[in-house]
Structures are given as structure tokens and as C-alpha cells.
Image (spheres, rainbow, N blue to C red):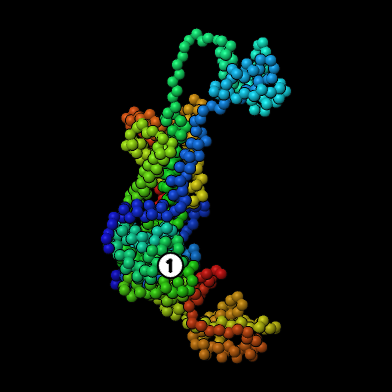
Amino acid sequence: MSRRHPFLLLVLARMRELMREPEVVFWVFVFPILLAVGLGVAFRNKPPDEIAVGVVAAAGSDRVVSALPPAGGFRVVTISADEAADRLRLGKVALVVVPGPSYEYRYDPTRPDSVLARLKVHDALERAAGRADPVEVHETLVTEPGARYIDFLIPGLLGMNIMSGGMWGVGFLLVDMRSRRLLKRLVATPMRRADFLGAIMTSRMILVFAEMALLLFFGWLVFHLVIQGSLWTITLLAVLGAFVFSGLGLLVACRTAKIETASGLMNLVMLPMFVCSGIFFSPDRFPAAVQPLVKALPLTALNDALRATILEGATLPSQSGRILLMLAWGLVSFAVALKIFRWN
Amino acid sequence: MDIAIRCRDLRKVYEGKPPVEALRGLDLEVRAGECFGILGPNGAGKTTTVEILEGILQASGGEVEVLGLRWGRSDRALRERIGVSLQETRLADKLTVEETLDLFGSFYEKGRSALEVMAEVGLTEKRSAWVVKLSGGQRQRLAVACALIGNPDLLFLDEPTTGLDPQSRRQIWDIVRDLRRRGRTILLTTHYMDEAERLCDRVAVVDHGRVIALGTPSELIASLKGEHVVEFAVNGNVEPRPLDPQSLLALPSVRSVRSEPGGLLMTVDEPHVAIPALLERLGREGHGLSRLATRHASLEDVFVALTGRRLRDE
């Protein structure tokens, strides 16, 4: 028999088990891509809608209509005063212009599109009437990758995956093995516990690499994501993240005997980070008073660091604060978990 | 003679409210090369004893020596030399039989080849099957195979046939007999008396965390005084003279009499002497016989005689 090292066989066994579990393949590889596609499409940057304007049929309405050409982004209908009131109320037009010696604008000032329409229409009408702008301006239009929602989202999804992968992949696995008495069975062999835990961590890392590569490649291919920072830095951050969340997973699992309890605990730990740590929206939206708490969460540090690296090209040394925070979380979790871990 | 396991005054208290005293001074000596059975009802302390001997649980008190070594000092050396099959271990569902055995084998310095062990427990055909697809009996044979893969000097089998169908039980028995023939020391626990009678050289009957009887199955049965059992029932106790069980002790060759649900049970030395006397007595007193059966006494009878309870509360 070709004898192989138990560590290698433990890693191999873990990888085989994972790959033979359709749910794992879905949650790890398919789900983040689906989420990226769904959110990327829903929140894609698009040109502003055309401005719907109702012009009340009266003397001078022709002049108004010709001052608001489709090329300027206007869609104009000429209608009776009653109908104009109806359409405004129903939101089918953003603004109603009543022509006359002086113009009257009717609109709802709480509707952003109406306010925009008023500015645009007023500007166009005044220019048509011969207003000269005293200052000359030039416009340079900038729409490029890096500032879109999808650019914000992909590093966040990567962070989220590293968190849930570490928590479930380590915490849930260990509780499951304990509840099947498999942990006890393994302890009854001469297996080294360091080999065992090391193998679980290693298989996590392998999975994290695969997830990361897939998500970044997909972002690049479909959404033209531009990765500013170095891939090494991103990889190191991902490894560090996997370490932190494996530690938290181990902590959740260290004494829990029942799968149900483990699920509850895991969600309890992850929920605040799902909401606060900037997966889907920036954590800056939370009030200043809670910012120190939000910033202290390990996923916030990971997401911020991933974003800074992917989108801004930040280097590792420039993020030492975030890295130290994550290291602290990881080391403390591991130290406590290993101290109180129950093998039987 | 070499002693494989020796434990003295073993005690175990599980913390809790109230604390549970699982072992209350259990003594045990297992000789090298024998198949030793721990027989007892559920909750007697069998698994606790075995798990302490396997180094999985810590005793609250007492001394344990396994293969001349002690837990806490020579753990790794001990784990290399013992093989363990726990009660109800669910191995990884989606590894194959061979992968599972290769993995367990890699933990041991002198691990055996998976092929060899699979052949020994009759799982060669299932080598590429996922564990989750195996039947209960096959899983249990795989558990035994995992215990054998390290080529152990001492094998622990905790309730190896609980919950299996008769055919699967017989397959496990064959494996155990085969191991014994080849000189392995085996400690097995069971609450099946027939299993202990068939497989074990010596049996310790355990109840409430203590050994209450020890010996070969035949010694234990002989200790009953009366190796045959006569069970019978009469058609109601006819007035005015109901059948007094104790009066039956006066019959020749009868050693003990006990009321059982639905009848009476006597242990006798010689059924061919006791039964005619019984029939004559019943006829004289006007009792009709509705059931009569005789059999060899079993370990179950030993347990009932010792505790007044049955092994399994059915």
C-alpha cells in the first residue's frame, strides 16, 4: 500500500466530501455569481429617463413645444388643462407648462423628477427666448468602470463568501461531526489533532481561492471589472479573512453538540455583519455614533480592505490597521476555541 | 497469563443536576487473547466503562491499565495499539468504503491495507460505494473494519450488533469469531445474552455501574443451580386451593421457582424427573395445564436471578 500522510488524506477527504455535496457547490460557486448578476443588472447605471412634459393647449404652446426638442431629452404632449392636471397627478408627466405671456410651471416639489424637469425645462425655455449665458462652460463626460454599483458589490460578495464559507465550512462541519460521534471516533485513533484542524483549514483555503478566482474572473468578463491592486494582495487578504472566519466558526463549534444550536449561533454572529459590514451598501450610511462598532467588525475590515485593493489599488502596508484588526480577531478566536474545544 | 486490561474500583460521575453516578466501583480483568463480554441492560454503565478504557472519557476515580500502559502518560502509544468501534458512529456519508479505510489507516504507523481489511469483513464488492448507500449491517462491518485497520492488539466493540437484522448480526459474529481464532483480544459490550453466550470466553454481568457476576457463560449458567428451565401456566387458580409457588420447591430436582407474567418459571436439575412430578401434583390438585415448555437456562436467566429484572425492558 502506498502510504500517504494523514494530513493529505484528511484534506483529500474533505475536498471530496465538499465536491460531492451539490448544495455546497451551489452556495459556494453558483450563488455569489447569481447575486452579482441579479444586483448588477438591477442597479446598473443607466442614462436618466427622458423628461415627460405636458403643455396646456393655448396660445403660444407651439413655441413652447419647439423649445423642448426630443434631442434635448424631452417628451412633450400638448393637452387640455384638465387632462394635464390628471396626468400630473398620476405621474405620467413630471411637469405641466401653461403658456402665455409669462409661463406657469405646475409640479410637485417633493418629486425629484419634477424638480429636475422644472430646471431643464426652464433652462431650455429661457435659452429659446434668447438668454445668453455669461460664462462659457465645457463638459467632459466620464463613465468608466470603478465607480459603478457592481464595482462596489463584487468585493463585498467576496467578503461575504469568505465569511459564510469559514463559519459554515468549519463551524457547522465540526458540530455535524460531533453530533455523528465521528469526532469522538477520530479522537480514539492516533490521529494528530493538529493534522485534523489543519486539514479543515487548508480545504477552506483551497475553496476560498477557487471562489475568489471565479468571482473576480466573472466580474472582469461580464461587468468589465477593473482590478487596480495586485492579485497577491487580494489573495493574502482572502487568506487572512478565511483564517479569521474559520476561527469564529471554530469558536461557535467548540462546545455545541446540536446542529440546530450551531445554526442559531452562526446566524447570530453573522447577521450583524451581513447588515453592517458593507456587503451591499456602504457602512458609512450608519450614524457616526455606531461607526466605531461597525468598523470593529472583522467583515467590515475585510470588505474595506478588499475594496481599497481591488478598486483603488491600495497596498498591504497602507492597510495595516485593518489587517491588525483581523489578525486580532482570528488569533483571539483560535486561542479561546482551542482552549475550550470539546473533542468528545 | 498476560492481562490486557485491568481496572480497579472504576468510578464515573456525570456532572449535572442531579449528578449521575454511572460507575460505582467497577473491577475488571481481561486476559490477552480472550473475547471478553460486558453484558448488561441499557444504562448499566457498559459504554461508560468502554469509553474510559478507550481513553475517550476520563474516570472520576479508580485505576485503569490497558496493555500495561496508562492513559494520560502513553496516549499515543496506546491509540496505536487499540482498535475501536463506538456505539452508533455515523462515518462521513459521501466518502467511499475504501476512502474511509485509507483515511483511518493513514493514522496508524503499522496501518494495514484497505483491501485486506475489506476482504476480512466482506466489503470488497462495496469498495467504491458511498457510506450513505450502505445498509445498516454493511455500515457496522465498515465500523469494525475501521477498528481493524490499525492492526490492533486489543479491539473494543461497543454494541456491535444493536439494531441489526439477524443475518447481519450473524455476519458480525463470524468476523468476531474469526478474530478470536487468530488470537486477538476483544472486549465487546452487548445487551443480547445470546451474543455473549456465543462469542465470549468470559462475561461480566454489569448492573448499576458494578460487576454483579463474572465467569464463562457456562459457569454463570451453572451458578443458577438448575441448568434447565421449565415454564408453565395453569388454567386459573381453582378455589379453594390456589397454587402456591413456594410449595413447588418440594418437588424433586426443582431448585427455584418464580412467578412470571402469565405463568411460573422453575429452574431444575433434571427435567425428566421434575416434569412428571409437576404433572402429577397439578392433576391431584385439579389444576389444568395450559402451557409447558422447557429450555436450557441462558444468561438472561442469570441476570433475572441476580437482579429480579430482565435485561431488556420490552
The residue tagged 1 is B138
Which residue lies at the image location 59% right of the left edge and 19% below the top edge? A68
Q: Position of residue B232 (x, y in %)?
A: 59, 83
Which residue lies at the image location 57% right of the left edge and 21% below the top edge? A69
Q: Quadrant of the C terminus of chain A?
A: bottom left
Q: Position of residue A260 (x, y in %)?
A: 51, 50
Residue nearest the viewer, comparing B133 with A79: A79
Do we see residue B27 in this rendering? no
Could you say which quadrant of the image residue B281 lies in? bottom right
Q: Position of residue B247 (x, y in %)?
A: 59, 83
Q: Secondary structure at mark 1?
A: helix
Q: Position of residue A104 (x, y in %)?
A: 66, 15
Pointer 1 indicates a residue of which chain?
A: B
Which residue lies at the image location 54% right of the left edge and 21% below the top edge? A72
Residue nearest the viewer, comparing B133 with B31: B133
Residue nearest the viewer, comparing A270 with B305: A270
Do we see residue B236 in this rendering? yes
